[in-house]
Amino acid sequence: MIKGISITFFCFALPVRRFVRTGGLSALLMCAATVWALPSAAVSNPVSGIAVIYPDVVEPYRSVFVQIISGIEEKARGRVVTVAVGAEANAAELNDSLHRQGIKVVIALGRQGMKAASLLDRNIGVVVGGVLAAPNNEVRNMQVNILSPDPALLFSRLKGMMPKVRRVFVVYDPRQNEWMIRLAKNAARTHGMELEAYEAQDLRSAMHAYQDIFATADRRQDALWLPQDSTTVEESTVLPLVLQESWARNLAVFSSNSMHVRRGALFSLYPDNVELGRRLTVSALALLASGAGDAAGMAPLREVLIAVNLRTAKHLGIDAGHAQGFDMTFPER
């Protein structure tokens, strides 16, 4: 019997029940929460060479993983092994169990799923989903699907809501988001915009950067993007000041973190759990078929839903009357 794996994951404070209903994964994986020790791993019937490693957690958290797995099973036509891991898993036993069942590729969900998968034999391919970040030394030969939305999708939505925007400001910590900013610069050019990026590796330099932005921004054609970045979008000090100042100056702020919409950001994109599961399966099937699959490294979230703050939209003079096109709106109706 496989022993469990200790699960610790991170999520913001958006009520989990509401986020589960709307398909969001971020509420589960973006707030400080620790799951207590759980029973030994439960393994489904083996059939296809693909396994899913996910946390064995109770409701309402389990529903989020159930949605992702339903997308995986739908795309794989049900032919997957599911392994629910609890506390203190034994890597050797996990490897032996997967080998006995003919597993060639693992879809690892969440930070601890990724950690467990990193201990597997090298001849088992790994596709990771549902993590906020992955240090380069942990990625090895894995494709890691980050929860932060693709900047191209964010900028497309921004243009749809504010066609006159020509410049986007962002403050980022290169230790966390250098790769994302490279994607964002290309995406901005594609959408006819300029990305003006400020580097900051501590709170003080981040605040100075925001002060410079507010001093020069033109609300008629500029916007401010808040990435997933614990340094430059620190929740207790930086974020409230940035949102307050942007409101006073009528400067549009959009975010990679859907919780910021509740607090006043104009909009954000968040995971569509079922579609995310399907996407992970496409990568796993490619890896299973060819041994190559998608390139190793990090990839942004492209399976998204949209959350919009209607009060902020009205404040900025944006016509958000077609709220039926939004998946989540604030204030809640």
Image (cartoon, rainbow, N blue to C red):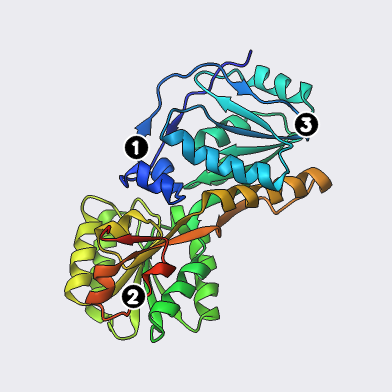
Badge 3: residue crowd in 10 Å (few <14, some 14–19, many ≥20): some
- Amino acid type, residue under disc 1 in the picture: Ala
The extreme top residue here reads 1
Q: CA distance from mark 3 to mark 2?
A: 48 Å
The image shows residue 265, relative to residue 25, as above or below, that is below
Q: CA distance from mark 1 to mark 2?
A: 33 Å
Q: Quadrant of the C terminus?
A: bottom left
Horizontal side of 188 relative to 254 (left or right) equals right
Residue 47, numbered label: 3
Horizontal side of 294 relative to 71 (left or right) equals right
Residue at x 37%, y 70% (from the top left corner): 323
Q: Quadrant of the N terminus?
A: top right
Residue 144 % position (x, y): 59, 47
Q: N-terminal of the two: label 1 or label 2?
A: 1
Q: N-terminal of the two: label 3 or label 2?
A: 3
Residue beneath label 1, please? 32
- Amino acid type, residue under disc 2 in the picture: Ala
Q: Is residue 134 visible?
A: no
Viewer-side label of 3, 1: 3
Residue at x 78%, y 35% (from the top left corner): 48
